[in-house]
Image (cartoon, rainbow, N blue to C red):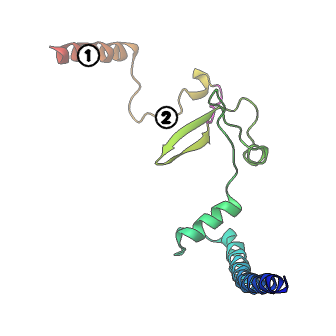
């Protein structure tokens, strides 16, 4: 019976020793990852003033930059709708009902606000382009229109 316990104890000691070695290895790996993370945090803190695409950064550094500074996550609903995070809506001054222009960009899209034009009347814009010649009469304008119509009919034949 004692030999059985001795073998069991010996086996447990080997397992313990193996687990200690594995723990030591994991601690070293954890320490290395902490140093790398610290280094990346230090590097990404300087990205605010730099463009990662023009300063020779590798793709991993660009990914970390995007992850830390630019990315917000959202989902597409069953109806195809996307929720734009409130922080971004406030940053860009987008209110409910804002119309957006969607531009295809390779593997993604770009959303830009549709700029509305102020309502104008003919009086607002009449004369905004200065004409350098003598004033045209109504008859001159009618002749120019007639000539344009005739030319468009001749081009069709």
Which residue in the protein does label 1 denote? 147
> Residue 73 location in percent, x, y?
69, 48
Q: Is residue 141 left or right of residue 13?
A: left
Instruction: Left or right? Give the position of 48 relative to 157.
Output: right
Q: Earlier in the sequence, mark 2 or mark 1?
A: 2
Q: Quadrant of the N terminus?
A: bottom right
Q: Residue at x 73, y 39 (%)?
A: 94
Residue 42 drawn above or below residue 96 = below
Q: Range of the magenta residues?
A: 114-119
Q: Is residue 113 left or right of residue 31?
A: left
Q: Label 1 neighbourhood size at 10 Å, few (<14), some (14-19), many (20+)?
A: few
In the image, residue 33 lies at what x, y percent? 70, 78
In this orientation, which residue lies closer to the viewer: 46 or 131?
A: 46
Residue 82 located within the stretch drawn in magenta: no
Taking depth in this image into account, of 4 and 125 the one nearest to the observer is 4
Residue 149 location, quadrant: top left
Q: Is residue 37 left or right of residue 130?
A: right
The secondary element bearing badge 2 is classed as: loop
SS for callout 1: helix
**What numbered label is drawn on residue 129?**
2
Whether residue 52 is visible to the viewer of this picture, yes or no, is no
Is 13 situated above or below 69? Answer: below
Task: Depth check: give the residue in front, 64 or 36.
Answer: 36
Task: Return the x and y of residue 117 as percentages of the image width and height.
Answer: 62, 31
């Amino acid at each position: 019976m004692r030999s059985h316990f001795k073998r069991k104890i010996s086996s447990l000691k080997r397992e313990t020793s193996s687990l200690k070695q594995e723990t030591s290895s994991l601690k070293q790996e954890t320490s290395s990852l902490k140093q790398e993370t610290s280094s990346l945090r230090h590097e990404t803190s300087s990205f605010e003033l730099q463009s990662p695409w023009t300063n020779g950064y590798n793709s991993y550094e660009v990914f970390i930059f995007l992850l830390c500074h630019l990315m917000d996550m959202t989902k597409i609903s069953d109806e195809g709708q996307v929720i734009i995070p409130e922080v971004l809506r406030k940053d860009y001054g987008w209110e409910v009902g804002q119309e957006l222009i969607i531009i295809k960009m390779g593997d993604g899209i770009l959303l830009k606000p549709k700029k509305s034009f102020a309502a104008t009347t003919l009086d607002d814009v009449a004369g905004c382009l200065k004409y350098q010649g003598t004033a045209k009469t109504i008859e001159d304008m009618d002749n120019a229109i007639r000539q344009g119509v005739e030319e468009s009919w001749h081009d069709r034949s």
